[in-house]
Amino acid sequence: MDTLFSGGAQPPLEAPRVLGRETEWLMTRYSARGQRLRPPEITGLMKTALDNPELLSLAAGFTDTESLPAGPVSRIVQDLTERQGPPEHLQYGTNQGRPGLRRLLSHRLEEWDGCRRDSMHPDRIFITNGSQQGLALASEVLCDAGDIVLVEQPTYFVYLDVARSLGLDLRPLPTDPGSGKLDPQALTSLLANLRTEGESERLKAVYLVSYFSNPSSRSMSREDKAILAEALQEAKLTPVILEDAAYRDLYFHTSPTAPSVLSLPEYEPFPRLYFGTLTKPFATGLKVGYACSSDEELRDRILYLKGAHDFGTANFNQAVLEVALQSGELDAHLGGLRDRYRCKMKVLHAALRNEGLPEAGWAWEEPEGGLYLWLQAPPGVDTAMGSPFWAAALDAGVLYVPGDLCFPTPTDTCFVRLSFGVLQEEGLQEAARRFGEAARAVVRG
């Protein structure tokens, strides 16, 4: 199997040895992290799609291209270019981000959580090149190789790539496989074991994808958030809480009721970082995310590293989104986008049911937001890359994300993530037909 898909251990990369031992001094010597780096799993999936243009992809977590706000962005850009005075939006911006945009984001957080907290103050917010950059910077500032991060299972597989590149020890939070809810008893045992095994000092962070999670589209309840905080306090552990809220805006009917960790009283003893994005609810190509830190020193240290990386997120893109928020263009667009994704989810959900997948033993929940369906295969069906089902799907002309990529220890190979973000309704129906064809082929085989 191509190493692009394997994800297994590979030797360090180095320059070719042209003449033998006497030229070993020509070898490129990488850092420990440089040697750990591998192509992200998403790279392999994208290569598969590009190598076969006839494939219909239910894999990419891209947003709906046809719905991208070309008209609003055009009006905003025209407004910016026609303003009187120097075009400051075309100049370098600050490392922390535009003050006006941070004020608007602070108000947005207060509205979502229904309260005002110091942790939501504009000074605690910094702007990033998408929320992914914030997650990577925070992990690098907090963790050394060998440090422990607790993650949900399943969780966002691109973050798992980041964590593995840092050499982190990823431990799954114990959950009920059916409901996705935390198992309080098992959680207490897990945290107690960290103490008895002398590993508590290495526990640096807990990573949560709290709203319409990628990949499962589930949201974490207020009750589960409280259970986690109380269990950590009982164990006298205070890791940094990393809350990834990239999909919080993308609900279909009503916004999720659980407040963020920024405002829940159970989380007051913990340093907290909340990560959001303005790209999924508006225009992904603008790549503007943000983070909000309850801890000023943590914010500053991340900004020190960020400044060394990029000298500040693109100021023009921030200016566009500042106007989009201030003018109401973003929320107007978002209202239509929610309807669009709800309809597309319904199309894919119905098409898979029409293919007879539930009768064949496939199971999934109908989500209330997000971009994904999370399917569990029948017993005995392996959905991992290179499996018979993977091959059958490629033969049928459809691509998916194997669910085992979304687990910190990839032992669960019976799940599939399907995205309804990119394809239009006709394409979703055809992709579902091909997926059903693959499912039937594996049963026949």
Image: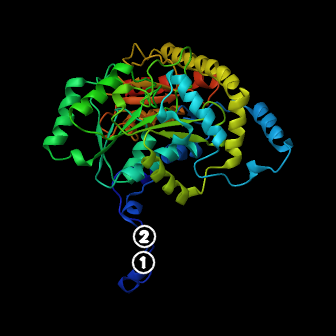
Figure coloring: rainbow
> What type is the residue that disc 2 sits on?
Glu
Pointer 2 local density, CA inside 10 Å: few below 14, some 14–19, many at least 20 = few
Write down the quadrant of residue 345 in the picture. top right
Nearer to the camera, 166 or 293: 293
Regarding mark 1 in the picture, which secondary structure is present there? Answer: loop
* Residue 351 occupies quadrant: top right
| Residue at (41% x, 14% y) in the render | 358
Residue position for label 2: 14
In-image side of 250 versus 171 (left or right) = right
Vertical position of residue 103 compared to residue 427: above or below? below
For the residue labelled by badge 2, is the local secondary structure a helix, a strand or a loop? loop
**Relative to 409, does residue 36 appear above or below in the rendering?**
below
Which residue lies at the image location 37% right of the left edge and 28% below the top edge? 445
Q: What is the distance, in whole Å, between disc 1 and disc 2 at their CAs?
A: 9 Å
Could you say where residue 220 lies in the image, as x and y percent from the top left? 40, 24
| Residue for point 17% across, 31% down | 189
Residue labelled with disc 1: 17
Q: Observer-nearest residue: 384 or 41?
A: 41
**Amino acid residing under circle 1:** Arg
